[in-house]
Image: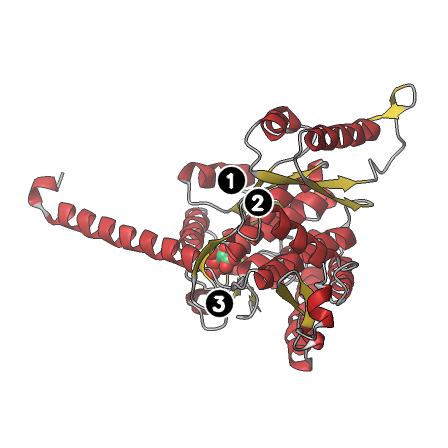
C-alpha cells in the first residue's frame, strides 16, 4: 500500500505523522491518554464498581430494604445499544434481570412493564442514560416509568440512577427527585463509542460482568492499532479494505454476519457506529462529499437462508464481513453425526457461504476470535472504533459529530410542539369540550 515512488521522491512531508497509503495519509491516533484523561476515567470507574458491589450486597437497596433484582435501562442510540450488545453477548449469568425502554412505542413500554410486573417494580433499579439529558425518547421513557412507580405508590427517585452530562436537564431532575446515584457522562465521549464509559460499564458491573477484562481487551486492541505499520495494524487493514471495496466513496454496503447467536446484536451495533460516524455530507475542508458506508446484517447460519441468495446472485453492491468464533460451547461437544458437531456445522456454513460468494466475485473479510468473553468483546469493539476513525481520516471527514441525528431530534421536537398547540386549541374550543 505504501506509495514507494513518492517515498523515494521525498514527497512525504512528515513521515512521523503517518504512512503514505495510495494518495492518502493515515493519521496516527493521539499518543497515550493524558493524566487528566486517566483521572476522568479512573474516578468514575472506582465509584461505579463500588456502587455495583453495594447493590449486590444489599447495602444499596430499595426503600424497605428489598434487594434490587431487576434493571430497567432507559436510553436510545448510543445510550442503549452498547449495554444491549454487552447484555446479549455476555449477560447469560446476569446477577440482575435487565429490561430496556429503547423506543417510545407505547405497546413496547407496556409489554416491558408487564414483564417486570407491578410487584417487581419495587425491586427494579432504573438507569436513565442520556448524555445530553434532553433526548425526547429517553425523557418519554422516564416519564412513563415514573408514572408506573407513582401508580404503584412507590418513590421513583429512590429507585433511579442517572448517567448523564453534568448540568443537563436530567442531571438537574435527578437532584430534584433525589436519585440514588449519578454517574457522569463525559462530553468528549461520543454516544456511539460510549460502551467503555459509564454508559456501558454501570449496567455491565451491575449485571456482574467482568468489566476489568472488557476494558483490558479494548486496551490491548488500542495498543495493537497504534502501530504505524499498515501491514500489521488490523484497524488500518480494515479501513483500507473498506476504502478499496467502495472506491473511497462508500460505493459498497457492509453486510455483517457473525456466526454466533450471542453476537447477533453486533451487526446492529456496527450499523450505528459506522453509519452515524461516516455518513457525512461535507468533508473537513467544507466540500460536499456525501460519504458513508451503509451497514446491515444479522447472524449466520440462520440468516444465510434469507441473505445468501441475494448476496451470491443479486446486485453486487456490498462487501461481506464474517465474524467467526472458534469455540463452540463450554461443555462437552456432542457428535451430531460421526465426527461432526454443531460447531462443525456452523463452521461449515460460514466457509460454504464465503466460498459461494467468492465464486461469484463477491468480496469478504473474516474476523476470527477464540470465544465470546469480556476480553474478546472489548477487542472487537475497539477494533471497529479505531477502523472507523482511520477510514474517516482516509476520506477526510469528521467521524465524531452527528448533525443528521440532531436535525432529526429537532424536527421531532417541532412536531411535538405543533401537536401540543393544536391539541391546546381543540381543547380550548367549547365545541370540542365533550
Ligand atoms: O451516538 C450518538 O451520539 C447518538 O446515537 C446518541 O447516543 C443518541 O442520540 C442518544 O443521545 P443522548 O445520550 O444524548 O440521549
- 151 vs 340, left or right, is left
Residue 331 occupies which quadrant of the picture?
A: top right
Q: Residue 155 at x, y = what percent?
A: 47, 56
Tell me which numbered mark, 2 or 1, is placed earlier along the sequence: 2
- Which residue matches tag 2? 99
- Which residue matches tag 1? 112
- Marks 2 and 1: CB-CB under 8 Å? yes
Q: Residues within 10 Å of mark 2 (few under 14, many from 20)?
A: some
- Toward the bottom, the furthest residue is 35
Above or below, 74 relative to 185: above
Residue 32 seen from this side: no
Of helix, strand and loop, which one carries label 2? Answer: strand
Q: Report if the beta carbon of the residue with label 1 is closer than 8 angstroms to ligand 1.
A: no
Give me the C-alpha separation between circle 3 and circle 1.
43 Å
Q: Residue 132 at x, y = what percent?
A: 46, 64
Of helix, strand and loop, which one carries label 3? Answer: loop
- Which residue matches tag 3? 284
Amino acid at each position: 500500500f505504501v506509495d514507494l515512488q513518492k517515498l523515494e521522491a521525498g514527497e512525504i512531508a512528515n513521515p512521523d505523522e503517518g504512512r503514505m497509503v495510495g494518495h492518502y495519509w493515515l493519521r496516527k491516533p493521539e499518543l497515550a491518554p493524558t493524566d487528566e484523561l486517566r483521572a476522568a476515567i479512573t474516578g468514575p470507574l472506582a465509584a461505579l464498581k463500588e456502587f455495583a458491589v453495594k447493590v449486590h450486597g444489599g447495602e444499596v437497596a430499595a426503600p424497605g430494604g428489598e434487594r434490587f433484582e431487576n434493571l430497567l435501562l432507559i436510553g436510545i442510540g448510543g445510550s442503549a445499544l452498547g449495554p444491549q450488545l454487552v447484555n446479549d453477548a455476555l449477560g447469560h449469568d446476569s446477577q440482575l434481570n435487565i429490561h430496556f425502554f429503547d423506543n417510545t412505542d407505547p405497546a413496547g413500554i407496556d409489554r416491558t412493564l408487564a414483564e417486570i410486573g407491578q410487584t417487581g417494580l419495587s425491586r427494579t433499579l432504573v438507569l436513565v442514560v442520556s448524555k445530553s439529558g434532553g433526548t425526547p425518547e429517553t425523557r418519554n421513557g422516564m416519564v412513563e416509568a415514573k408514572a408506573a412507580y407513582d401508580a404503584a405508590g412507590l418513590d421513583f427517585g429512590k429507585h433511579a440512577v442517572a448517567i448523564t452530562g453534568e448540568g443537563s436537564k436530567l442531571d438537574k431532575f435527578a437532584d430534584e427527585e433525589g436519585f440514588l446515584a449519578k454517574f457522569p457522562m463525559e462530553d468528549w465521549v461520543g454516544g456511539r463509542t460510549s460502551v467503555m464509559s459509564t454508559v456501558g460499564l454501570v449496567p455491565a458491573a451491575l449485571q456482574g460482568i467482568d468489566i476489568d477484562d472488557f476494558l483490558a481487551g479494548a486496551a490491548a486492541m488500542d495498543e495493537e492499532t497504534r502501530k504505524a505499520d499498515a501491514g500489521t495494524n488490523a484497524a488500518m487493514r480494515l479501513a483500507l479494505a473498506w476504502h478499496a471495496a467502495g472506491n473511497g466513496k462508500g460505493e459498497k454496503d457492509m453486510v455483517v454476519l457473525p456466526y454466533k447467536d450471542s453476537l447477533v446484536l453486533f451487526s446492529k451495533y456496527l450499523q450505528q457506529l459506522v453509519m452515524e460516524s461516516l455518513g457525512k455530507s461535507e468533508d473537513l475542508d467544507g466540500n460536499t462529499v456525501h460519504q458513508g458506508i451503509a451497514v446491515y446484517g444479522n447472524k449466520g447460519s440462520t440468516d444465510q437462508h434469507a441473505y445468501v441468495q441475494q448476496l451470491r446472485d443479486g446486485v453486487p453492491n456490498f462487501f461481506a464481513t464474517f465474524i467467526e468464533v472458534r469455540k463452540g460451547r463450554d461443555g462437552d461437544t456432542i457428535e451430531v453425526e460421526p465426527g461432526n458437531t454443531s460447531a462443525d456445522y456452523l463452521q461449515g456454513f460460514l466457509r460454504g457461504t464465503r466460498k459461494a460468494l467468492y465464486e461469484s466475485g463477491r468480496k469478504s473479510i473474516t474476523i476470527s476470535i477464540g470465544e465470546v468473553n469480556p476480553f474478546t468483546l472489548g477487542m472487537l469493539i475497539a477494533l471497529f472504533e479505531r477502523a472507523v476513525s482511520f477510514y474517516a481520516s482516509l476520506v477526510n471527514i469528521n467521524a465524531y459529530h452527528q448533525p443528521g441525528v440532531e436535525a432529526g431530534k429537532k424536527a421531532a421536537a417541532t412536531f411535538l410542539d405543533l401537536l401540543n398547540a393544536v391539541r391546546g386549541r381543540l381543547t380550548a374550543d367549547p365545541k370540542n369540550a365533550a
